[in-house]
Amino acid sequence: MQPESLETLRLTPDRDILHVTLNRPKSRNAMSLQMVRELQQVFDSAESSGEYRAVVLRGAEGHFCAGGDIRDMANARAALGSASEDPFRSLNREFGRMITRVNHSPLTVVAVLEGAVLGGGFGLACVSDVAITHAKAKFGLPETGLGIPPAQIAPFVVKRIGLTNARRLALLGARFDGSEALRLGIAHACHDDDTLEEALRETLEQLRRCAPGANAMTKQLLLQAADCRNGTELDALLDQAADDFARSVQGDEGQEGTMAFMQKRLPRWAE
Amino acid sequence: MQPESLETLRLTPDRDILHVTLNRPKSRNAMSLQMVRELQQVFDSAESSGEYRAVVLRGAEGHFCAGGDIRDMANARAALGSASEDPFRSLNREFGRMITRVNHSPLTVVAVLEGAVLGGGFGLACVSDVAITHAKAKFGLPETGLGIPPAQIAPFVVKRIGLTNARRLALLGARFDGSEALRLGIAHACHDDDTLEEALRETLEQLRRCAPGANAMTKQLLLQAADCRNGTELDALLDQAADDFARSVQGDEGQEGTMAFMQKRLPRWAE
Amino acid sequence: MQPESLETLRLTPDRDILHVTLNRPKSRNAMSLQMVRELQQVFDSAESSGEYRAVVLRGAEGHFCAGGDIRDMANARAALGSASEDPFRSLNREFGRMITRVNHSPLTVVAVLEGAVLGGGFGLACVSDVAITHAKAKFGLPETGLGIPPAQIAPFVVKRIGLTNARRLALLGARFDGSEALRLGIAHACHDDDTLEEALRETLEQLRRCAPGANAMTKQLLLQAADCRNGTELDALLDQAADDFARSVQGDEGQEGTMAFMQKRLPRWAE
């Protein structure tokens, strides 16, 4: 991936953390098809490079992401009839492919939520590992008010905050702020202008104390656990987790981590 | 359904919203077998009529529902031996059939929770899409104190608030008020006498801004998402959701919603 | 089980409730392999004796449990190569076997969380039915900071508090206190020195008002419900629950519970 080829994203590497800025500020960073594709390319490239352990997602100029892009919808309408697949369908589905992909990235994903966090932006926030919101951010699922379902987003909202609250939010097209997003469990922390940047800095510092490989392994385990039933499925997952444990405790990170702990120093990855 | 034939419910249509009042105030609206059957009839009839988009469930004279009906239990005991199926079993199972049915109704279900919200009343509250509670409502699962399990209710409590809190509530036969119901996620909002009616009015106003068909589609999607695993199951659900999206964006609601948004007016369904 | 043969646990029966104290205070009750095995023996024995309805888990001298035991890890390292199975793997897996077992115990499990509630201690707390925490307890998943995954623990954290918060806790190796544990849903109540003992006493009193057999049946139902999908699976569970209901309402507890309720007296099990 060549950063200069990106039209909708701005990349700012900071050692092992890649800051990705949604960068269409004129449309409050609306999630165009181009942005959907570039996000997937950026994750592909960041993961395969082996240089990064985490991605910070944030929007340019005070908004995270205001949802889908109107121009894409117009293009889809224009393409009706000529395309082999319904262009509305493929436009919508591509967005779901992207958040599914981000959800399963082995990189730790930190989202900084400010201004508009609507529709697709809301969906993207729901697949972050750590979400820090500004108290005045504006969250919402406006779709049903426009006569359409929040199709690719709703499943991720349910997985983020549970069915009970997802029902209310989606069926009322509810709007709410950052403190409510914290209460609902969409975000993990809520800050104002004075403390937001410091909270992000501390989160990244805390993240860097954890071993990158152990984190990737743990994230995979957590995602599997969320789908796993008691009984034979859970037993199988715990068997696999024991294998992971045995491998990592004897691996580089496990040996370095134990050593550092006994020598009362920071492990290599945290320096 | 002929409203006049209902013994336990009172129906009050308000345009596209059907107000259903549990109406056995002498027994704090205890959920008799008759009421269980009438609730199913009312939902069948309201859905097939095509006249309604939502149902508001509420109890007469200050109580939502105090749980099962003692007379039904006595009748079941009297019928022991003569019935082909165990009458306690069929009585209990019928209640579960009703809340399963209400849970999956394409209509949006709003519950107003006041006074006693116990046992079966608690279970019914757990399948609403939006639940507004009075601060002084009395919630509880008293069953285990009577030597029986909250059999048809417990699964819906787990799906409403998660296993962790369901364990404590059911195994301690806990009693608690509306503000705790809000904290636990049983209700979405908690009000007192001064604000409850206004909160209901605002909820219905907000609901009316959302398109009825899009809401029915979205509710179905949310219920499916709650059961759906990552991987091929989620992919299949997102495929189906993309089909729903494409169909609705080109349908009446989607066209009207987009048009109204561009013309900065309320869509037809919200007038 | 002969209490005097236990090296790591102290047992204090109080009528139908068995108090189990994790008793390795010099290592803040670190969860040694010996303790893992003894906990399983104690549950086996307490269940089969028929004398107990509940277990209270607590740590000696102000700490619940500080996680895995360093000596076990050293022993595992020493045994590498000679054992038929990887000793790290079997050490880790045995812990998961224990919490799986405690999770499914028909006895109601009450945890009192004080001081260190770390790693494996955190995992054990996550399978309690009722958890009461001291406000100053120190919770955390330090594993990833040591270069290893919280392998047997992570799945139970996800099932306790959901994926969203589990992601943050595990991937940041987060540390937090009792009031945050309450907010996250790990504990059900948070107290300080003045009220903790009274809260435990009240919890046990409340528990004793519920019928032991109905509680065991209800706990099993709740665990099944957490894994159950809507549709045919839920229908089958509700069928089974109706059988349970019919059986228990006609059984000793159901008859005594109904009688006591009508006679306005405490049921036999609550005396």
Image: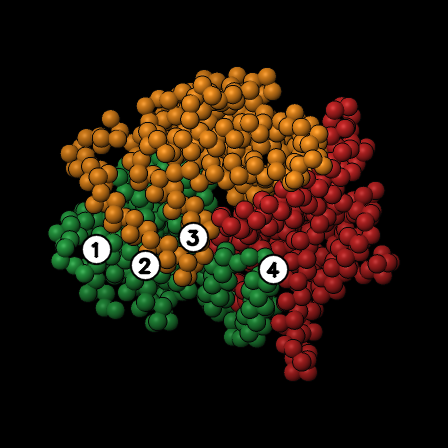
Chain colours: A green, B orange, C red
Q: Residue tagged by mark 4?
A: A231
Instruction: Identify the secondary structure beneath mark 3.
Output: strand
Pointer 1 local density, CA inside 10 Å: few below 14, some 14–19, many at least 20: some
Q: State which chain disc 3 sits on.
A: A
Query: Mark 4 is on which residue type?
Result: Gly
Q: State which chain disc 1 sits on.
A: A
Residue at the spot 14% in from the left edge and 55% down from the top edge: A81
Spatial distance from mark 1 to mark 4, Cα to Cα? 43 Å
Q: Identify whether B219 is placed above or below B225.
A: above
Residue B200 figure quarter: top left
Spatial distance from mark 1 to mark 3, Cα to Cα? 35 Å
Choose the circle earlier in sequence order: 1 or 4. Answer: 1
Spatial distance from mark 4 to mark 2, Cα to Cα? 31 Å
- Residue B268, position in %: x, y? 22, 30
Name the disc covering residue A86, or none.
Answer: 1
Name the disc covering residue A130, or none.
Answer: 3
Query: Mark 1 is on which residue type?
Result: Asp
Instruction: Identify the secondary structure beneath mark 2.
Output: helix
Residue at the spot 44% in from the left edge and 54% down from the top edge: B228
Residues marked 1 and 3 touching at CB (< 8 Å):
no
Q: State which chain disc 4 sits on.
A: A
Instruction: Identify the secondary structure beneath mark 1.
Output: loop
Spatial distance from mark 2 to mark 3, Cα to Cα? 21 Å
Same chain for the residues at labels 4 and 2, yes or no? Answer: yes
- Residue A74, position in %: x, y? 15, 49
- Residue C137, position in %: x, y? 63, 47
